[in-house]
């Protein structure tokens, strides 16, 4: 029995195989070989934060595998009234087959996994967003093939859950990740220590993006950071992905964003809606990549 709390819960070989499998599943969504994978099984989704893509992609994945899903929003479960994560894990384990959890502090999803006897998937915590990276790696693979040796630039909040998962991916897939972020928005030192020489940080957006094969950003104001919005916009403005910054990347560079996007802040409309952007494939691939993940864990 395995959990998926960060990308590092897979081996690099498993991660590569998962991306390949996601591409296969994409070709044939209702393949008879997989449509009963979750038959008579139930996936419980505990979401303590908002979601469009993650919720819908997991529910559709479960439906395409013949299973049932139960969605508990923040007010729905007794956790909102103080029932412990550990008690909840025991209860869900005794009835359901898979837990998908979106929460704030990463400790909460770790506690869920510790006390669960069924697989737990991290559908985003404050520290990591590993499911997003499965789709991002699949999307790069579809457009450009092998990631090893590629140059990826992440601009903006280097301490975001998405950037932290990119750091894990860089170490596992052996690509160069250059993070352009102001000093106060550098990644967590512990997370960074896993990536070794695959990851560099600079406070110069131009230096980070130079010759990049892929440019990535994320919202400047993540869920739970709304009160800091004005300060974040001020601090992160020099790291906006726009026409001028994209001109410093490789001419064939792709642009990715996990979405939701805020046009005019972290990215301009001409970039996200332009020819280098692959954000719609990236979003769709959440479905296929998570199907491959469910298959692996179940
Ligand atoms: N990218 C992502 O996780 O989107 P949602 O918040 O809509 O699930
Ligand atoms: N970093 C963003 C990702 C949203 C999918 C957040 O945590 O809100």
Image: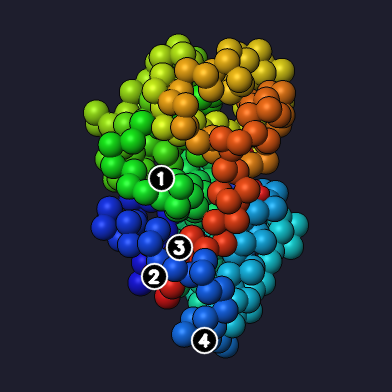
Determine the CA span between mark 2 and mark 3. Answer: 14 Å
Q: Position of residue 172 (x, y in %)?
A: 29, 45
Q: Is residue 280 visible?
A: yes
Tell me how far mark 3 sits from mark 4, CA to CA.
Answer: 17 Å
Do the residues under discs 2 and 3 have CB atoms within 8 angstroms? no
Q: Nearer the viewer, residue 247 or 203?
A: 247
Which label sits in the foreground, 1 or 2? 1
Label 1 close to label 2 by CB (< 8 Å): no
Residue 45, image x and y in percent? 61, 64
The residue wearing badge 2 is 296
Name the residue tied to disc 3.
23
User: Which residue is at a point 74% across and 62% down the rendered structure image?
Assistant: 76
Q: Is residue 223 above or below residue 289?
A: above
Q: Secondary structure at mark 3?
A: helix
Q: In this figure, which residue is indicated by the disc labeled 1?
A: 144
Query: What sort of colour scheme is used for the picture?
Result: rainbow
Tell me whether circle 3 and circle 1 mark residues in contact (CB < 8 Å). no
Residue at image position (54%, 38%) is 256
Residue 162 placement (x, y as % from top left)? 50, 39
The label nearer to you, 2 versus 3, is 3
Q: CA distance from mark 4 to mark 2?
A: 17 Å
């Amino acid at each position: 029995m395995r959990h998926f709390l960060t990308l590092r819960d897979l081996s690099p070989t498993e991660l590569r195989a998962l991306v390949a499998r996601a591409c296969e599943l994409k070709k044939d969504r209702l393949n008879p070989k997989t449509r009963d994978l979750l038959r008579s099984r139930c996936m419980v989704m505990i979401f303590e934060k908002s979601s469009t893509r993650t919720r819908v992609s997991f529910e559709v994945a479960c439906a395409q595998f013949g299973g049932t899903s139960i969605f508990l929003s923040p007010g729905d479960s007794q956790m909102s009234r103080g029932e412990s994560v550990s008690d909840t894990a025991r209860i869900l384990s005794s009835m359901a087959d898979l837990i998908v959890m979106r929460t704030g502090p990463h400790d909460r999803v770790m506690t869920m996994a510790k006390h669960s006897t069924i697989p737990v998937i991290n559908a985003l915590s404050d520290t990591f967003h590993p499911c997003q990276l499965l789709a991002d790696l699949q999307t790069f693979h579809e457009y450009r093939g092998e990631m090893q040796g590629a140059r990826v630039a992440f601009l903006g909040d280097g301490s975001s859950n998405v950037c932290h998962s990119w750091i894990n991916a860089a170490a596992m897939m052996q690509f160069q990740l250059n993070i352009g972020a102001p000093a106060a928005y550098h990644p967590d030192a512990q997370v960074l220590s896993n990536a070794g020489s695959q990851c560099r940080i600079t406070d110069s957006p131009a230096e980070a993006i130079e010759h990049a094969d892929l440019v990535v950003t994320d919202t400047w104001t993540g869920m739970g950071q709304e009160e800091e919005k004005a300060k974040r916009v001020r601090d992160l403005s020099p790291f906006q992905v726009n026409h001028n910054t994209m001109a410093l990347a490789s001419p064939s560079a792709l642009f990715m964003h996990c979405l939701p996007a805020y046009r005019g802040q972290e990215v301009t409309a001409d970039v996200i809606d332009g020819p280098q952007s692959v954000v719609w494939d990236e979003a769709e691939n959440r479905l296929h990549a998570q199907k491959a993940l469910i298959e692996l864990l179940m």
